[in-house]
Amino acid sequence: MPFELLHCGPILRVVKATSIDFPPAQRLRPPASWQSNDMFFDDAYMAALLKKHASKLASHRPGHFALATDPKRERQRAWANRTLENLEPRGAETLFRNIQTLGRFLQSYNELAVAAILQTAGLKLAYEPEIDGKTPDLVALDTGDRPTHIIEVLNRRRPKPVDAADRRWDELTDRFARIHEPWRLRVARISGDRTGPYPDVAIHLVRETARWLASNPIAVGQGWAIGDYTFLVVARSPGTDLELLTPVEEVWVDSDALADEIREKVSRYAGLAGELNVPMVVVVGADDNLAVTSEVVRSALNGQLSVSVNLNLFGVGSGSSTSAPLKLHATDAPRVWNRALSAVGWLKAGVDEPGVVTLFSYDKAARNHGIVSSKEVILG
């Protein structure tokens, strides 16, 4: 089966944790053949996806559609396939299935990117292996299949109401792109509501706009209203189809809230890390539209309060503005963590390559994470 992902360029060197003679019960029991021989994102899989979804609006296609079918993403598919092929077969199939599951693409993609970065360091990884009744996202293994690291990937998502509103704007943008008029329009709601229209309203807006454009002379600065929606012509489009600029939702992120989510992850696997006597690392990934930055992650670990926001810059277009964290204050005492936590990382995922991880060590950890700096791993 085919799949598409980032090209894996980083080289991550890892110093193994102290060698421990694990009892047989703490060793994984992988299938006889460790490496998968399957090609996950291949031509046949691409053809099947195109046949089923190519005619749909982009916002109605599955999350992995571009990764699996876009001719410009060959490098991404290459590193994705390579990463999956180097996982043990059961874990590879599970991760591949998760990538295709509705609503799980971003989470699974981040897990894949972290795995790719660690594999370039020569680490042998298992995905969601069962150890003593628990299933960590990733476990690094030695040559005897004994765990050396537990790696959890924490995926932060936008609030559901914001995500739903953004999807509706995306759908409206897709529908407007089918109008063959070379104009760029800006849309707003008279009521001030920032949510996008539901499909029946979206279809009506497209029909009325197409009729208006066909029956009136058009110039930059002209505008009209359809129900609660106003439209303004802001420029000629460099292409041949209509472009729609939609409102962008504001999303705030603060380090205290992030720390609570990290703590929940740690509490779930701290006992297992202690039992195996291995370092535990939590890597934070995020939706591109969230304002999570490396500074927010650092502050979450150290106990400082940082706030970051994606501003609603109306009319700039779909997407989010570049944001920087605003440090409000530092607490009187550093944040105290379970000593099973060795480090917290921030993943800046890429496309042609898996991306970069910025890693912050917990100085009171029971075990050092042992990961050293490289081009793809920045020690903060």
Image: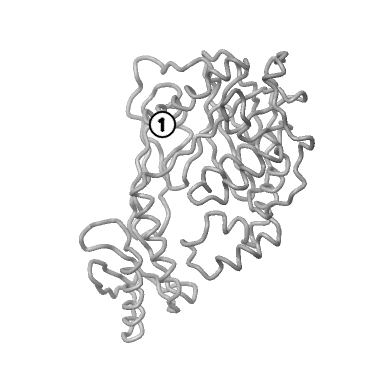
Quarter of the picture containing the N terminus is: bottom right
* Left or right of 214 on screen, residue 82: right
User: Where is residue 197 shown, x and y percent of the image?
Assistant: 32, 63
**As rendered, which of 376 and 151 lies closer to the eye?**
151
Residue depicted at 46% across the width and 37% down the height? 293
User: Where is residue 316 shown, x and y percent of the image?
Assistant: 38, 59
Snapshot quadrant of residue 71: bottom right
Residue with the mark numbered 1: 258
Task: Residue lying at the far bottom in this picture: please name it.
Answer: 215
**As rendered, which of 164 and 284 lies closer to the eye?**
164
Residue depicted at 41% across the width and 18% down the height? 335
Provide the secondary structure element on which disc 1 rests. Answer: helix
Depicted 87 relative to depicted 250: above or below: above
**As rendered, which of 301 and 163 lies closer to the eye?**
163
Residue depicted at 36% across the width and 61% down the height? 246
**As rendered, which of 180 and 169 lies closer to the eye?**
169
Query: Dot 1: few (<14), some (14–19), or many (≥20) neighbours within 10 Å?
Result: some
User: Where is residue 55 shown, x and y percent of the image?
Assistant: 53, 71
Quarter of the picture containing the C terminus is: top right
Type of amino acid under label 1? Leu
